[in-house]
Every structure is written in C-alpha cells, then in structure tokens.
Image (tube, rainbow, N blue to C red):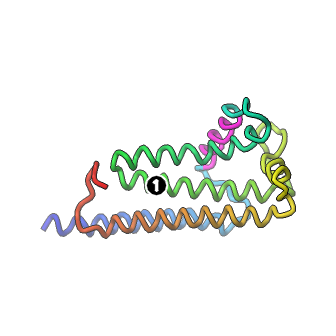
Amino acid sequence: MENEQRPAARLWVRAALIAGLFFFYTRWLAKDAYFSPLDFVNLAFHEAGHVFLGFAGRFIMMLGGTVFQLLLPAVCLVHLRRRGANLGWQLCLFWLGENLLNISVYAGDAIKQALPLVGGGEHDWTYLLTAAGLIAHTDGAAKFIFLCGSAVIFWSFYLIGRDALAREPLELGNN
C-alpha cells in the first residue's frame, strides 16, 4: 500500500512544483523588463564573467557576462546529472532557461538602454549586436533568445513531469 501511495504523492508534489515554476515563468509574459529575485544571483555570475574573461579581448570580455550567466547552471546541471539527482539537474535546466529569459530582456534593451547597468559603462548587448552586425535586429534577437529560454523551461517541465509518472521510484544514482 505504501508503494502505491508514493508515486501518487510524487506526482502531486511534482505537479505543484511545475505549477509554481510556470507561475514564475509567466512573470516575463506580464512585464516587458521583468527582473526576478533569482536574477540577483545570476547578475553576480554575469559580472564575474566579465572579470574572468577580461583578458581575452574586448568581444570575449563583453560576451563573458552572458557566458558565465549560462555556464554556472549548466555546470550544476552536468554535476547533478552525473550524480543521478534527477530533480536537481532538471531544476538547473529550468534555471538555465530562466537565465535565457533574463538575457533576452538585456539584449532587447540594446538600443533603448533603459536598464540600469552595474557600475555604468557600456551596454554588453549594444556592443555585441553592433559587432555582429545585428543591432538593427535587436527585437528579433531578444525574441529568439526568449523563445530559446521558453523551450528550455518547457523541456524542464516535461522532464520533471515525466519522472513523476515513472513507475519505479527514482533513486539517487539511477539514470
């Protein structure tokens, strides 16, 4: 009897988690320049990327913020996946998608430059899109990044839900 109830409980917990994460996702649909509480953490990694890649030339230094912002959740994802912590790496996949949503807001601001910059200075995405010859396509670039982030987020929802429906209990170390 206990084994029959466990999958049902896991299903409800995962469904509630997906619902909460979906609500969190909808904040980007409700506001043009949404900045989530999680983005304060992401911002620290973004700024660290500029510092750590500052030696590699101007373009790489400017791209370094975005690279580090995506790199940290990706590294956590790989680490947790190797350990067999399914929910952990699936949440890191959501985090990666959430970072892409944040990056889409920043890229979309390349022409307007209305967002406050940490320490002032040059807007990363104005420089990057100009250097790539895409500054005239700022809105399209932002929408593309947003759609990529949304796809990653919905993939994480699918994986979280799929594990909830698994017949066998998920154990640490099983893939």
Residue found 41% across the figure and 66% down from its top = 16
| Residue 62 position by quadrant | top right
Q: Give the range drawn in magenta.
A: 39-50
The percent position of residue 9, horizontal first and vertical second, equals 28, 66
The percent position of residue 64, horizontal first and vertical second, equals 69, 41
The residue beneath circle 1 is: 91
42 left or right of 143 in image: left
Magenta stretch contains residue 113: no
Residue found 59% across the figure and 66% down from its top = 150
Looking at the picture, which amino acid does disc 1 mark? Answer: Leu
Mark 1 Cα-neighbour bin, 10 Å: few <14, some 14–19, many ≥20: many
Residue found 62% across the figure and 63% down from its top = 148
49 left or right of 93 in image: right
> In the image, is residue 1 above or below residue 109?
below
> Which quarter of the image is occupied by the N terminus?
bottom left
Residue found 66% across the figure and 37% down from its top = 49
The percent position of residue 128, horizontal first and vertical second, equals 79, 49
What secondary structure do most residues of the magenta stretch adopt?
A: helix
Magenta stretch contains residue 40: yes
In the image shown, does 140 or 99 lie closer to the viewer?
Answer: 140
14 left or right of 129 in image: left
In the image shown, does 19 or 73 lie closer to the viewer?
Answer: 73
Q: What element carries label 1?
A: helix
The percent position of residue 38, horizontal first and vertical second, equals 58, 49
| Residue 112 position by quadrant | bottom right
Q: Residue farthest to the top?
A: 55
> Which quarter of the image is occupied by the C terminus?
bottom left
